[in-house]
Image: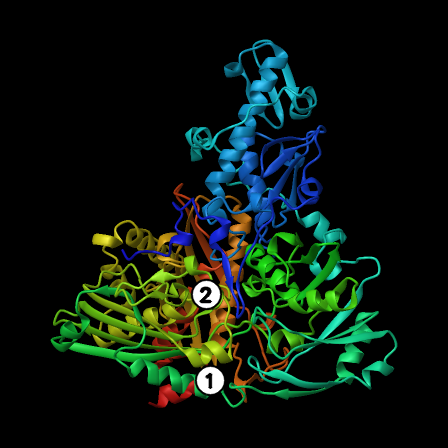
Amino acid sequence: MNKHIKSVTPEMTDLSRRSFLVGTAATGLVLGYAGVPGIDQALAAAPANFEPSVWYAIAPDGLVTVTCGKADMGQHIASTMAQIVCEELGAKWSDMRVSLASNDPKFNDPVLGAQITGGSWSTMMNFDAMSRAGAAGRMALTEGAAAAMGVPASELVVRDSVIAHPKSKKQMSFADVVKSGKATKTFTPDELKAIKLKTPDQYSMIGVSVPQLDIPSKTNGTAKYGIDVMIPGMAYGAVVTPPVRFGATVKSVDDSAAKKVPGFIKAVTLDDKTQTTTGWVVAVANTYANAKKAAEALKIAYDGGPNAKLSSQSLLDEARRLQKLDDSGQFFVKDGDPAAALGSAAKVVEAEYTTSINIHAPMEPMNATAEFKGDILHIYSGNQFATRSGAIAAGAAGIDPKFVVMHQMWLGGGFGRRLDADMMVPAVQAAKAIGKPVKVIYTRENDMTMDFSRPLTYQKVKAGVDGDGKLVALSHDVVSAWPTQRWGIPDFLTPSVDKKGPLDSFTVNGADFFYTVPNHHVRAIKNEMAHNATPSGQLRSVAPGWTFWAVESMIDEIAAATNQDPAQFRIALLDGKGKNDGGAQRLRNTLLAAMGLAGYGTKKLPKGEGMGVACVSSQERATASWTACVAHVAVAPSGEVTVKKLTVATDVGTQVHPDNIRAQVEGAALWGLSLAMYEKATLKDGGIEQTNFDSYTPLRMSQVPEVAVAVIANGEKATGVGEPAVTVIAPAIGNAIFNASGARVRALPITAEAVKGAMKA
């Protein structure tokens, strides 16, 4: 197995906050926090609370408040963390509460070090730490109760927030123990590690679909999102963005018309040393409506910069050029000698696969509120990467990052978009310019044209089979912008196996699959033109959203070329040999489960209909979730495709909340369908052409097919579920289209024109 990116390896526990640097034109910024007068005191819990862990506190009334260090964007991760704590703590679910963490380093992830929400890592990587935190609290409370009741701790039973001594019939509630002050035991890291946790057969909370703790406040309106923030005396900012996505500069600003707008305060041209934004102006006024009117009234002259003439075709042409160069890129996988094996192969199959630019478009538009209180900058916003966002806010303000306090809000959707902190830059610089708090809210047009989008990708795959139809070689080149490199965080890059330097493994994850192929190369090639013109981010599913599109389509193409059933061909390749031991078996099981649930191979379908399969190990090899799909489609003579049913099976190891897992898998599958069939953004003259949902068209409710989900819970370590199903849908649909019509499609999104053209070919 190739060396995996160290910052997301589950065993990695020593990554410090000092490792997380934000590269800028001027400097590297480190998020600091400790030692700033007034901050520690302001964030400290009430003295009367019992805090067994930084992750939760028990109040004198017995309520347990779990602090979630993850961004909650509707996936209910705060409730999940509380449920894990509750299981080992022995609390009553109705006593559980949740809060969201600030950017205090004490809340850094137990494994990653940084406060980051992505990669479907949250449950997977925090299950053990939160379980141990809960168990430590139970043990401390038990010792306190034993001392108070004068009985041996070993004879006490904890259930539903009550510590009982069956022999004497004595009992104390958690509230009683906290009020007694007897709970004082603390644990060293070694003692925490030595705690014996429950086994799956002992669970009473894990695996139960309890009510989600965030639902009441989200339905009664008391939950606060970034867009809800109100600060006395604050002003509002509306951004004016240039016609070029990145690289433009402001030549001049005429605010004479804006000055006629009631409540107009100032037009601020951003001077963003972090290079998160270029060429932006923010109009500040007393209301958001007036800020928008003022923004529309500004007359701004731009220098479009070096990317002003680029288009999607420019980026694709450059990708093709780079792929043809023998010395471009770095190797992510380098097993055997594919060139030699291809030279002697009985049959060679090759194809190129592309994906378009895709936009996040969460429902809550990007927003941030900035307020300076003396030397301290307070930022109110929902974000997925507090560690990096705090440093960007500091860079925008020109202050030390230790003077930035991030107030985490509920997120009205994220999907990777809020891993970036561009919305904080105009808020910070506007607040600094006018000396008052400023809330900035993007329009939908701002958000779409300035999104840190999923990059346009180009992939070339070449495969060889021997005389028995066995896959003996596969070479795979992946050309794209490198989103993670843009972050400027060295620890998030991966050393290349050819020692040519670090590569962005978040552009090639998934290409290191669990099929046994003796000669296998994967080359990661950075498209510098795309990297500069369309600064890319992580969109739900990241690289596996395009790498598995290529891999799983090619596997089907090989099966077709050698007259083999594509499902059985996969099963033979998932033999679990060598480095694929364990993972291949779990993936094969999910494929068999999906096939069985869908009735693959057992139904005679009408003419023009077909089923296609795909199976993936998303997100990453070291943190995989095993997921398979059978897609059932109908293809009309016009090339129009109707997706009739998606059957998805996923192995989650340990399921914390069954209903939530199903909801996540269903949502991921529909997002995958949307990317496969409907979503496309294009670059023209350096700018994104699609500005709203009339031209960027995600899946509509009328287009939703039947979705069947099979969840495999086998007691193994919990895996992630938010993203993997996204990655399996497109190839399953593409393969189904071929089985229905004979048309092989290789570009996303799949269009009727492409299908009809392939049918004729």
Helix, strand, or loop for circle 1?
Answer: helix
Number of disc labels: 2
Q: Residue at x 55, y 50 (%)?
A: 660
Going by the image, does 300 lie left or right of 6?
right
Residue 113's x, y, as percent?
A: 49, 48
Residue at label 1? 752
- Mark 2 or mark 1, which is nearer the start of the sequence? 2
Q: For this rendering, which residue is in front, 433 or 257?
A: 433
Task: Give how far apart the Cα atoms at labels 1 and 2 are.
Answer: 34 Å
Quarter in which the C terminus is drawn:
bottom left
Crowding around mark 1 (Cα neighbors within 10 Å: few <14, some 14 to 19, many 20+) is: some
Crowding around mark 2 (Cα neighbors within 10 Å: few <14, some 14 to 19, many 20+) is: some
Under mark 2, the amino acid is: Thr
Q: For this rendering, which residue is in front, 399 or 236?
A: 399
Residue 11's x, y, as percent?
A: 38, 45
Residue at label 2? 484
Q: Residue at x 45, y 65 (%)?
A: 484
Q: Quadrant of residue 338?
A: bottom left
Q: Residue at x 68, y 25 (%)?
A: 175
Q: Which mark is residue 14?
A: none
Please state which of the two labelled residues, at mark 1 or mark 2, is closer to the viewer. Answer: 2
Q: Quadrant of residue 435?
A: bottom right
Residue 474's x, y, as percent?
A: 23, 70
